Amino acid sequence: MSIYKRIMNKLAAPPKTINTQDEFINWLFFANAGMLHRGNLYCFDYAIKNIPADTSVVEIGSFCGLSTNAITYYLAKNSKNNKIITCDNWVFENAGKFLENGGFILLDDSVDNSVFECARLPKKIIKGRKYEVVVKNPNYLFKKNSVIHNL
Ligand SMILES: C[S@@+](CC[C@H](N)C(=O)[O-])C[C@H]1O[C@@H](n2cnc3c(N)ncnc32)[C@H](O)[C@@H]1O
């Protein structure tokens, strides 16, 4: 895409979106890390309202489960008990699996109070004790903690 087109896209008003959020969904978005566009909620609700009883919901790319929890919520809200099958190649965990002890992970957009969901990850990562914060400038740079990993 040309630079001109990219600039015009940035300047364009965001597409109009039907937002089906309610109090539960707002809390879910607050508490659950994720990358879910709120417009997807209407699509979840629509699909679930119209899903045949004996079929399953298959989600590819659940990441931290925000969309999975939203789908589960809409299933319950619509009194549906379809199975839900989710999968992900868990990008962050895989990064950790292949990262050498002492290796670094920089979380872009993770600055405290950032509007991006990524900003919810640092607290979880710190709690997990597999990484230590080595720089906060203002985004978080983590180092894989070799001592804890070698225990
Ligand atoms: C935009 S994120 C999804 C966000 C998530 N649904 C949420 O509510 O936050 C895309 C996810 O798809 C996963 N993904 C990408 N390709 C995949 C694949 N081939 N199989 C399974 N998961 C995949 C990535 O690991 C990533 O977590």
Image (spheres, rainbow, N blue to C red):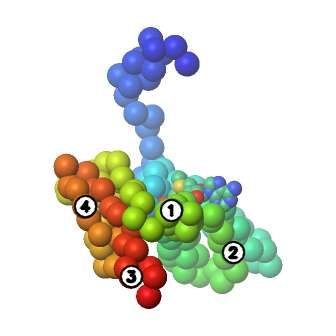
- Residue 148's disc number: 3
Comparing 127 with 12, the one in front is 127
Tell me the quarter of the image containing the N terminus: top right
Say what secondary structure mark 4 lies in: strand
Of the two numbered discs 1 and 2 on the same chain, state the one appearing first in sequence: 2
Q: Residues within 10 Å of mark 4 (few under 14, many from 20)?
A: few
Query: x and y percent of residue 53 in the render?
Result: 76, 77
Q: Amino acid at mark 1?
A: Leu
In the displayed structure, would residue 148 be above or below residue 100? below
- Residue 134's disc number: 4
Q: Are marks 2 and 4 in contact (CB under 8 Å)?
A: no
49 vs 40, left or right, is right
Q: Are marks 4 and 1 in contact (CB under 8 Å)?
A: no
In the displayed structure, would residue 39 be above or below residue 93? above
- Residue 85's disc number: 2
Say what secondary structure mark 1 lies in: loop
User: Of the residues tagged 2 and 3, which is closer to the observer?
Assistant: 3
Report the Cα–Cα distance between label 1 and label 2: 29 Å
71 vs 149, left or right, is right
